[in-house]
Amino acid sequence: MSTIFGIFNRCNTPVSPEIFQKMHIAMSYWKPDESGSWFGGSLVLGHEMLWNTPESKLEQLPYQEDHLVITMDARLDNREELAQKLDFSVDRSMKQITDSELIIASYRKWGEDCPKYLVGDFSFVIWDERKQHLFCARDHLGIKPFYYYLSEKLFIFVNDLKGIVVHPAIPKGINEVAVTNFLVHSLLIDKSLTFIKEVQKLPPAHSLTVTTRIVHKQCFWRAEEAKKVKLPDAKAYASRLRELLEQAVYDRMRSDYPITSHLSGGLDSSTIAVLAARRLKKTKEKLLAFNWLHEPDGDDDPDYYEWSNSKTIAEIERIDHNYVPLTEKDIYCYMSSHNIAYGDTAGFWYEYPVRLAAQKRNSRMILTGWGGDELCTYHGQSHLVNMMINGSFITLFKELNTRVSKRKKRIKSLLTIVYHDLLLPFVPSKFYCKMPRNKCLEKYSFQFIKRTFLPAINREKKKPSLTMQQKVTIKGQMLAYLNHGHLQGRIESWAASAFSNRLEYSYPLLDKRIVEFILGVPPKFFVHNGIGRYLYRSASKGLLPEKKLWSNEKIEVQRVDRLCSISYSAYLAIIKEELCSKNHNSDFGDFSELQKLLRHPPKDGKMIQLVQELGTIMSIIQCEKRT
């Protein structure tokens, strides 16, 4: 992990050293291991280094070779392949070759097409002195952030928004379109917007070329173009996926620091953790893993799924297994101590103590299974309608029979499956599909939100949902999930919050090679005999106990119950006191509705939703007042 930043005066005037120094200070709040800068008159490049991979300790960034200068935040996974294609000297071992050298050499050979040949997580900027242009690129899945401000006279880029707001050219105030998007979806899912006015994101798989006169943006990879994969049988597909899984995990373990992983007991995180743990055993090291759950106590059942699975797997694989505590004071602190304008949109509360605990153990990287449900471990919701469209009625009948034969109310179950999986996909979305409703905004008297954003929120809700093709094909649904923006939203949020803990996240299940493979797999391999995630389960044989591998038991009731058991009434009281003390009465009315909530708080998930929405409103106010 590194922070990168730069200023390019497109009018050819020298960059102010004072302004660059402000950016440097703003970008180094997390105490980097090394800092570097390169001055070129109208262009200045900066870099703040966090060591992680062995090669990162050899980097001197920004790095210059002849007429090319690079600053980057990158981890390349096809290093050996690139070194061969780029004819690197045989008298140098791969341990001596840095990622910046490989990217520079790729640019020399392939020019602006070079990102197509890179595998890994990266955002980088190359200054080509001969062509007098800046070439910027962001990786295929958008794991590494890249933000920029562009005007006729100025181009500023960063991968951490805290650095860009200190530049005097950045307009004051928030981007109301981005806030509207966030309020509707509870996450900023737009691929180009940020909360900061006129500051944009470079979308995943895009490059940007900037000169004094020209700006050119292009897409260098499209998931839609993934080729069909043709292998002999189901066993061959599972075997190939297993190879790719192992490769994706092992490539991300190239670190000089303790390896950390999520371990919830579900398929995604468990498979990744086991592969990592077995790899570490060879060097007599232990995997450090965290479960998004408190340690069982009191009336908690330690044999319940979420506790028992992760614990059992940890015992078998000798993983250093840890739980994380969470209280209402913790949640309030997380909500009120940061500003979502900088990208951390405050959610997934258990992840905050995970990051802190990992930092205390000197870890600098967390492996996570996020992104699996949408692609690699896809449940196969559209496979029944696929069978019907393709005329495979006998197979469809057998699949329906297999599903309902395991249930008590067979006729009711059959009708439910037919309605949801076979009929509903063909009904136009406008007749049944509604955008998420932020009930807190609509019901209670928070005039600040209503006055500023409610009209735009209503317009956002009217936007179309999935197309027919996306609803009735497995590949269409996968691509819809990939292009929706919620994957990118969480990735960027976690990246923003992880800087403070000197950490970076790695997503093996969002490896470009796995994504391309999964999108090319025939639909029939995702579900078999009523068992979802069939291909992934088959590829994971030997990693998890058979009973847990083939169980469809994954639910998260205990974690939700725990959150509900937290004293949200006390939390609401804290919010009320906080808002009153900051003189927000004019924005929030007289709190009459909030008083009713304190006397009769909602139960279960509705309370969680309400508290998150109240926290969102607090964050938006902080966002508006950032300047």
Image (cartoon, grey):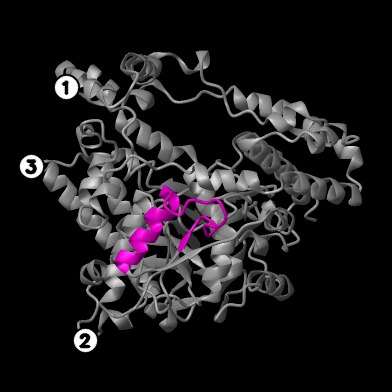
Residue 220, image x and y in percent? 37, 49
Q: Are marks 3 and 1 in contact (CB under 8 Å)?
A: no
Q: Is residue 573 visible?
A: yes
Mark 3 against mark 2, which lies toward the viewer? 3
| Residue carrying label 3 | 232
Q: Secondary structure at mark 1?
A: helix
Residue shown at 50%/53% (left/top)?
A: 491
N-terminal of the pair, mark 3 or mark 1, is 3
The one nearer the camera, 191 or 220, is 191
Disc number placed over residue 91 in the picture, else none: 2
| Residue lying at the far left of the rendered structure | 232
Amino acid type, label 1: Thr
Amino acid type, label 3: Pro
Question: Within the magenta stretch, is there residue 292?
Answer: yes
Answer left or right for 402 relative to 40: left
The one nearer the camera, 231 or 305, is 305
| Residue carrying label 1 | 395
Tally of numbered tags: 3
Residue shown at 62%/69% (left/top)?
A: 42
**In the rendered view, would you say 598 is above or below 220?**
above
Magenta segment boundaries in residue numbering: 290-317
Q: Alpha-carbon neighbours of circle 3 within 10 Å: few (<14), some, or many (≥20)? A: few
**In the rendered view, would you say 584 is above or below 313?**
above
Amino acid type, label 2: Asp
Q: Secondary structure at mark 3?
A: loop
